[in-house]
Each structure stands twice: as structure tokens, then as C-alpha cells.
Amino acid sequence: MKYCTATVPGGARRSARALWCALALGVLLAGCATPVPKVFSFDSSSNSEGAAPRTPIVWPAPPEPARYAWTGQLLGEANFKAVEEKKVSAMDVLRWLVGLFSGDARPLQVQRPQSGVVDAAGRIYVTDMGNAAVYVFDRVDGVLEVWDKAEGLANFRSPVGIAFGPNGDLLVADSQLGFVARLDTGGNPRGSIGKGVLTRPTGLAYDPLGKRIYVSDTAAHDIKVFDDDGRLLKTIGRRGEEKGEFNFPTHLAFALGELYVTDTMNSRIQVLSDEGAVVKMSFGALGTSVGNLVRPKGVAVDGEGHIYVVESYNDHLLVFNRSGELLLAIGGNGPEPGKFDLPAGVWVDRDNRVFVADMLNARVAVFQFLGAEK
């Protein structure tokens, strides 16, 4: 369903609700208004502490050459600004009426973001555990969509992992429902994967060449592999601390022909061959220094081969090279730009923007990779 910000008269008394309901009914009977054109922006001023600063913030700090810059944040409706005088549509009135009777007419905003992906057109899809839905920041049409249906009439309960799958489908792992939902490009459910097989699915990754769907089954301590039709092909790993074994694996990424697995309770990242038979690399260790992995969560790889890991316990985004050597740490606890509060997932787009699901700050922080030193 598409939502647009609109200005609706406020301060109505409870005794006047019947009148407003009648007016709303008239609007509904008259038909839906044309959606108000909107302009999307990463920079939002609706959260003063997290808004994009006037002076650019970069990492590392001067005098070192800047490698990353704060771009802004994704919040929700606040990222869409009208370009002409606002008009009230039927959907706006319905939303206002719900708020009038419930005492809550706040704009749509992410609450507990988990993971995300960006399509070729620049639309950003974010799983939100707090709202039990997928938020779609449609930069093309200038609207915010909220998809809450997982299968049939069943709503999402705890969506975590998300990935583009076969035939343009969007795959969403719901840890409480215990399956991976298939959604079409309009957010309509198209069935499920792993029902009765998966215990607590969290991370997702897709290999388009090998036509393999990888799902981290956190409670089972393994990675389950499905084909495009959703048939289980094999299971990778078991509980343990040796190579190829896992202890509560969570987030996944597939890049450069390799599967990246966040082995969360083993405090490491394991990099597997595309078939999952060989551990090509493992890095990370428990410790108290910046760069150690205490409770790693999100993992992603950009077009330059940098590996991004979210260290949720210490509120950091860590940048490693392809050999697993630490290059840079961004973070610390707080609401300011470049700081986090229990971050979860991380993902990148084709322009090497880096997105971090900053869970308890109720936002997605956005950074721009500026390039490596020449």
C-alpha cells in the first residue's frame, strides 16, 4: 500500500469526530485524489540529532584522506518532500481518522530495521522487525510503501534477512514464521520456501549463476541451500567451533563467487566457496579492541572488494580488506551521525553507498565510499 505525507487539520475535539467522519466519507465516495509528487532525499531534518550536518563528516578524520562520508539517513515518510501544495487524498484521511481515534497520527517511520537491499532503479527495501513489514523507499515514484503480507493473508511477524531471488522475486526470511516468503515486484506474496524445514531463518543470500538460495538457520546452527523452486538441496555445517561449523549464524552475503557467513557466537566471519564445501577464509576474534568481533551481525561486500561487518555489541561498522585485515572502524554508541545503537544489518548499492540498519536509533544510516587512495 502506498502512503504519502499530507497536511490534515489538527486540534479536532472528540465531539466533532462525527463531522470529520462524514467529511472523510465524502472524500472516499468522491474517489481517490492524484498522489502528490514527492522528492526523495537521504538528508532528513525530522531527527535533529541524526540529521545530515552542514559540515561534512568523513572517516578517517582529517588530516587523513577521507574514505567515507556521512550521506544521511532513512527514517520513513520524512525522506519524501512534496514539490507542490499538498492535497488530501482518501488514504490520507483514512490514516488521519485512525490516528484521531487512537491518539496516534505520527508519520510512518521504521522502528527496528534489520537488513536491506537496493534494486537497479535505486529503490531501497528494508526489513523492519518493529513494524513487522518491509519498507520500500521508492525513489523513482517518490512514495513510501509498506508491505506486511508474508503468505496469503498471513502477516510478517519478525522479518530479518532479505535478498533478490529468481525471476525478480524478493525473498524475506521471517524468523518467527519459520520460512522465507516470496514476494513479487509489487509486494504480493507468491508462496514460501523452507516451511517445515527451517527452524529460525535469519540471513539470506542468492547466487544468480549457481541458482542457489542460501538461508542461515540460526537455531539449527547451519546454512540450508535451496534451488530456485524452493527444494532443499543440502545443509552446510553443524554446531561447533571448527572450520565449516557454526554457532548461531545470522547474516549472509554472496559476492565474488563466495558465501560470507556471520558466525555470530563464534565471533568470526567465515567465507565459503560457492558450493559451501571449502572454507576459503575465516577472520575475527573475541576481544576488547576495536576491530574484534564480539557479536557480529550484518556482512556485505562492495564493488571494490571491501568487506563490511556490523559489530553490534560495540556499535561499530568495521571495514576489512579481502584478506580480512581491518582497514577502518566507524562508530561508537549514540544518535549522532556515524554512531549507532545496537546496529544489525549492512548492505551496499551499485554506487558504493553503504547502508547500516541502526536498530535502536530507528533509522538506516547511509555512508558514501569516496574511493581508495591512489
Image (cartoon, grey):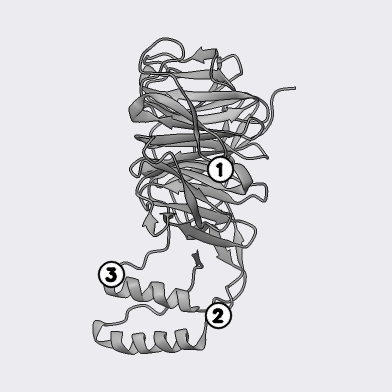
The 10 Å Cα crowd at callout 1, few under 14, some 14 to 19, many 20 or more, is many
Pick whichever, 217 or 357, lies toward us. 217
Q: Which mark is residue 33?
A: 2
Residue pushed farthest right?
374
Task: Say if residue 331 shows up in the picture.
Answer: no
Of residues 340 and 248, which is closer to you in this image? 248
Label 3: which secondary element:
loop
Query: Which residue matches tag 1?
Result: 117
What residue is shown at x 51% (from left), y 43% (from top)?
116
Q: Is residue 201 visible?
A: yes
Is label 1 in a helix, a strand or a loop? strand
Q: Indicate which disc, 2 or 3, sits on the residue closer to the N terminus.
A: 2
The picture quadrant where one finds residue 326 is top right
Type of amino acid under label 3: Gly
Nearest to viewer (mark 2 / mark 3):
2
The CA span between labels 3 and 1 is: 34 Å
Sequence order check, earlier mark of 1 and 2: 2
Amino acid at dot 1: Val
Q: Are marks 2 and 3 in contact (CB under 8 Å)?
A: no
Mark 3: few/some/many CA within 10 Å (<14, 14-19, 20+): few
Between the C-alphas of marks 2 and 3, the distance is 25 Å
The residue depicted at 35 percent of the width and 18 percent of the height is: 239
* Above or below for 228 versus 8: above
Q: CA distance from mark 1 to mark 2?
A: 31 Å
Lower position in the chain sequence, tag 3 or tag 1: 3
Q: Which residue is mark 3?
A: 103
Residue 38, above or below 55: below
Q: Position of residue 135 (x, y in %)?
A: 48, 53
Q: Secondary structure at mark 2?
A: loop
